[in-house]
Image (cartoon, helix red, strand yellow):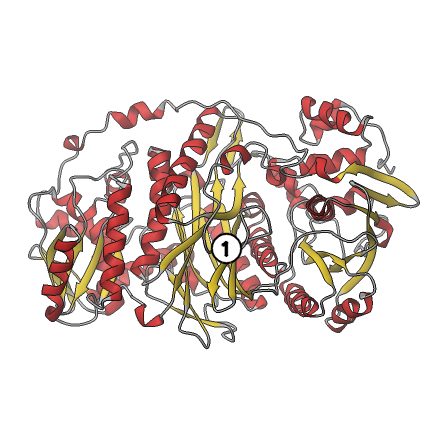
Amino acid sequence: MDVSNASTTVETAKQLGLTSDEFDKIEAVLGRNPNFTELSVYSVMWSEHCSYKNSINYLKKLPRKGSRLLVEAGEENAGLVDIGDGMACAFKIESHNHPSAIEPYQGAATGVGGIHRDIFTMGARPIAALNSLRFGKLDLPHTQHLIKGVVKGIGDYGNCLGVPTVGGEVYFDECYNQNILVNAMSVGIVEHGNTVSAIAEGVGNPVYIVGSATGKDGIHGATFASADLTEDSSQDLPAVQVGDPFQEKLLLEASLEAITTGAIVGMQDMGAAGICCSSSEMSAKGKVGMRIDLDKVPTRQANMKAFEILLSESQERMLIVCKKGMEKELEAVFDKWDLECEIIGEVVDSDRLVFHKSGETVVDVPAESLVLGGGAPVYDRAFEAPAYLAEIEKFDINNVQDIQDDSSLKSTWNNIIANPIIASKRWIYEQYDSMVRLGNANTVTASDASIIRLKDTKKALLASTDCNSNYVYADPYVGGMIAVSESARNIVCSGGTPVAITNCLNFGNPYDKNVYWQFVNALKGMGEACEKFDTPVTGGNVSFYNQTVYPDRAEPVNPTPVIGMLGLMEDIDNIMTLGFKNEGDEIYLVGESRDDINQSVYLRILKEVKYSPAPHFDLDSEFNLQAFIKSCIQNKIINSAHDLSEGGLSVALSESCMAGNLGCVVNGDNSFRKDAFYFGEAQSRVLVSIDPSKKESFINAAQSSNQEIYHLGKVAGKELVVDGVTISTIKELIQSYSNTIPNHLNN
């Protein structure tokens, strides 16, 4: 039975994920009882995934203005930044967590496809992809299954589409055993004046749907992403979309070519909530209405109901408003690329979205009532500090025995290097093509950030994704600042200048007071750091409900606000890599060392201490450190730079040795605990190497900048020697570092 025009009740609303208050509000907006199709539309558009109803008030507090920004956060599908010479960069990060947890291959693949569509919908050609992935314990068969599926999904889609995956991060923690996080980032470039807005304008202009036909995959996907995962969530598998990267490649080329015809007024991709989302957002932005005939939508299955067509999240589709009289020009392009291109309606002089099916009106609602910033509900949830903070406050470093002998130093060092959190992710990123389609750009590796050189220019873009969720768990405010600052530090250590960020805010259930406290404080810290580094927020994604609900408990993931940062390098001669370069180069640690092992891999994994504060962090010190490193790079004083993060100095030294295939002989500062000096993760520190002839210049620069430095030793030989202890040969170090993940996944 077709229930499109059936009357609805509060119970119907609750079954669709709405509350009784929201149902009352819908009736007030319409002045009548909504039919089933209308209520279905509101259920997806007012879901957390589409409306940001529990987060928008705090998102608005983030800094959203900057001299390089061409659009403010939320104005378009992605951020747009001026990079000079008449060029702009579009970039954005989004999550596809729930679908990837249920069906890892398609969930990850369609996440990649969706984020790239956000970029080329604006008229920019995607030139690079990054990701941020969180999995559970690596020794669990379930985790291994998810990793293989996600990695293959990302690799297959990106490689087929022809966009190189140039960087990212992978973490393992038991809090992600069931709720994995799959965040995908896309970076594209476009000439000024060639961008397209997601807007509907011009009464009488035809509305087209282009790309793939509409099927039943992904129906209520936005609602699925706005609820907790449970033991029965696998039954929601139809909510996972199915992607076709070859179709997306055709759509990409056709869309960019269609823009050059001048026929396009506005264009938006169909992601979450499908046709109803793109049509309502475009109409509301243009302050117009649309009249759509759903019978004209090309479908994959016969007899699809109105709500199925409206809510379908079938991939590789766009909604386009065309200039009346230029229909043939638009259609010729999509015909050339063998893609569906059908007029399904027109722009009308009203504020309403009206959808027809089989000669009947199935939806008649104000467009503004559906969208973020319009009629969608907005909430401030109650929050309170979680009880576990009391356990964190009890931590005393004096209760942790320091490293006592040479044997303990060696074994601790090698255990950290081989830990999955630290070990090489080569098995993962080798399945991505980082060099595909180099017509617009090429990539540079072995730097703290991904460097994307722009062909025929001296410029390069830099990008990084960062977040240590354990820091955010221990102190969301400080952890939020560190996430932004580490991303900026990676850009600076690679030779670039931080420009702007996009974020993917992964948290548990917002109705949980402790989770909402984490969210509020993490955003406060992020905002302050963004202000300091002049890196405004261009947009991104909020992903709540990343928790698994069992009959007796709920298990949220650690708060994980992932930062995707964009940087700019005006002159590629300033590229800085992390590997040691020459025998005899002097090695220095820049920044202040402390007796601090808080939330370090050493403390959490090797000492099995879960509760400790976030590592020491001071925003002013971080800012000054980055200014000093940037100056050293521009003045050609240093030969390598590598920031200290997970694993502290031990990992930084090891990675610089491995990247340069050179050993070193170093000695620590005995005024600190040995475990804190080598394995602590106190922030605002960078490992550098310099030519001996530049030593005086380096020391003078540090003194004039009031920057603390410590001489560690020299680059020498093929062994890593620390305090007279041979930790490992470089060859053995590389083997240990490289084999951890393959040994788990190739069993």
Q: Residue at x 44, y 31 (%)?
A: 520
Q: Nearer the viewer, residue 443 or 633?
A: 633
In the image, taking residue 720 as reference, residue 329 lies left or right, namely right
Specify the quadrant of the image occupied by residue 482: top left
Q: Residue furthest front?
A: 67
In the image, taking residue 665 as reference, residue 37 lies left or right, namely right
| Element assignment for label 1 | strand
Does the rendering let one see residue 558?
A: no
Q: Nearer the viewer, residue 254 or 654?
A: 254
Q: Residue at x 83, y 65 (%)?
A: 325
Q: Position of residue 717 (x, y in %)?
A: 13, 70
* Dot 1 alpha-carbon crowd within 10 angstroms: few under 14, some 14 to 19, many 20 or more: many
Q: Residue furthest right?
A: 359
Q: Amino acid at mark 1?
A: Met
Q: Nearer the viewer, residue 739 or 678?
A: 678
Q: Position of residue 669 (x, y in %)?
A: 8, 49
Q: Position of residue 668 (x, y in %)?
A: 10, 51
Which quadrant, please, contains the C terminus? bottom left
In the image, taking residue 686 as reference, residue 142 lies left or right, namely right
Q: Residue at x 71, y 29 (%)?
A: 15
In the image, taking residue 681 as reference, residue 170 lies left or right, namely right
Q: Nearer the viewer, residue 99 or 414?
A: 99
Q: Residue beneath label 1, please?
A: 185
Q: Where 555 falls versus 605 (above or below)?
A: above
Q: Position of residue 175 (x, y in %)?
A: 42, 38
